[in-house]
Image (cartoon, rainbow, N blue to C red):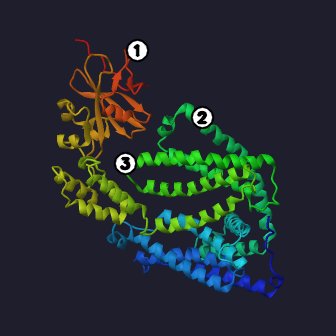
Amino acid sequence: MTDPVEPAPDDTGGALNRRAYARLGAGALQGLALYLLYRAIDSHAWPSTDHYWLAPLLIVFAFVPLLFVQACGTWRFRTLLLWCGGATALLASLAWYDIWRQWEPGVLRNGDAAISFAFVAFSVVGLFIAQSLIAAGDHEKRVIASYGGYFDAAWKLGVQLALAVAFVAVMWGVLWLGAVLFDLIGLSFLERLIQKAWFAIPVTTLAIAAAIHVTDVRARLVAGIRTVALTLLSWLLPLMALIAIGFTLSLPFTGLAPLWATRSAAGLLLTAAAVLVVLINTGFQDGDPAHNRPRVLRYAEAMASIVLIPLVAIASYALWLRVQQYGWTVERVVTAATILIALLYAIGYAAAALRSLMGGAWMAMMARVNVLTAFVVLALLVALFSPLADPAKLAVASQVARLKGGKVDVLHFDYNYLKSEGGRYGRAALDELLHLKLGANDAAMHRLAKDAMTGAPPATGKLSRVDIARNVTVYPKSRALPRTLVDQDWSKTGGAPACLQQPGILCDAFFADFDGDGNDEVILVNGSDAYWYGTILKIGSDNVWRTLGNVAGRCHGTLDALRRGEAATSAPETELRDLIVQGVRLRPDRAFVEPPACPG
């Protein structure tokens, strides 16, 4: 492991003081700028009246001074100047785009649009990676630094930020404690003071700058904290590796159906892969061969690296199934980007493990994989938060293509998704759908697109037959919903399926005899192929339809089997017969028992 960089001899005198003054000055200027922006927002003055100015200014003054404070005095001046200037330009541009891509400029003037949380959160991630890469390169005076340099720079920055956050939290705790103590003797000046924005904002930024400076000149303290954290975390690797291996070996016996039933398989698998990657790196650390860890940790690294492959492969397959069935959405585009990163780690780490087991330098390839992946992450973040690969842009294009290609019916298309998730691109798509010609249902498509664009509220009261017919797809196609069910006023029926109460809520209808009386009940189903929920409706002796029970499917393929008519009810073993789909017995839960007839 490389030794932490201690201050140079001249840093103990005037140079160290100049570094402290520069950092505290930057923190004070940052606090002043953020306070002025706060005042502008509070008083509805410029630039808060124009989000195209407000968003870039907020992002730049929130992040760029912190980049300067952390690097001041430890980077060459030219590197520091170029990086702060480049970061300012990039952040301002991406923040401007983050506002532009939202629903419509008219909303911005009303103050209803703001910087998205995702942009702010991933800006932190991207800036952390970039700051670490540049710090190591500047220290070694190379474009691509050694892996040990990157390791030291990243951990130094991470520990500095963690300690700065802790210091600020404790500082505010002390201030509030002081306010409470003064309140006990009837003095409230401190409580009023710390609630003033002109005090709270600059004090916070100054405290962050001071914390970063103190941790910067105490490099051995940072290194000590790093060593303790890595040592503790590394011993969780064997446990997590055993869990991942056990899970993977169980899949041939359980199948993938239980995994699909979670409806979040890709996310869960990617989370497990991320934990493995972090724990593998706690053992590998800076890759120095002199860093000799116990054999159990070495082999845990290898096994965990290999098991990454099936975890990420299954996550990729889960995403592929969803995209094939329902097209791209914003969430799926982001998941695809995450899978790309996970694949780089999985393939690289598995190759490093196999090479190590064959006699090569232990896990040596991990260093190159980590550096390459860091640059790929930066490129992906820029692409995702710019027009290059905006998830909303890609999702809208995919969904509209499915509509035009006939993969989804005009009456079943989710027009509201274009507005809720598509932003400016969704609005452009709805504008196009207002005039698009696809066939017999063009008038309905134009009306639904217009309702989504204007935000027309769901209709209240009884749905018309046309609305119910548009909401409900009946299987088999040769059958139709009973006239009494369609004509019933479902707005007055509690617990009724939403597709009978609101326009635009889609479901499928099937028929089966659940109570064995010789008459089919109606099942209204909503959900996805891997997880769906059905409401069983039965007509009573008074010709009123009521909920008889509910049935749910948690296996991949069962909904498609229902649509193909490949289902039957069981022999009467219980009060309600089971629904058998693809050999799976689905047991209904009884929800309603018709009351007995009143005595004569």
Query: Mark 1, residues whose alpha carbon is within 10 Å: few (<14), some, or many (≥20)?
Result: few
When the figure is inspected, residue 16 is found, relative to residue 309, above or below; the finding is below
* Tag 3 residue: 326
Question: Marks 1 and 2, how far apart in space?
Answer: 33 Å
User: Does residue 290 appear in the picture of this structure?
Assistant: yes
Query: Mark 3, residues whose alpha carbon is within 10 Å: few (<14), some, or many (≥20)?
Result: some
Q: Quadrant of the C terminus?
A: top left
> What element does badge 3 sit on?
helix
Report the residue at 47% width, 65% height from top: 384
> What element does badge 2 sit on?
helix
Q: Nearer the viewer, mark 1 or mark 2?
A: 2
Query: Which numbered disc flags the more N-terminal residue, 1 or 2?
Result: 2
Mark 1–mark 2 contact, CB under 8 Å?
no
Q: Return the x and y of residue 201 as percentages of the image width and height.
A: 59, 74
Report the residue at 38% width, 17% height from top: 575
Question: Marks 2 and 3, how far apart in space?
Answer: 29 Å
Q: Quadrant of residue 528?
A: top left
Check disc 1 and give the amino acid type: Glu
Q: Residue furthest top?
A: 600
Instruction: Say left or right for 391 vs 224.
Output: left
Query: Which numbered disc flags the more N-terminal residue, 1 or 3?
Result: 3
When the figure is inspected, residue 481 is found, relative to residue 25, above or below; the finding is above
Query: Which numbered disc flags the more N-terminal residue, 2 or 3?
Result: 2
* Tag 1 residue: 573
Q: Return the x and y of residue 165 as percentages of the image width and height.
A: 67, 65
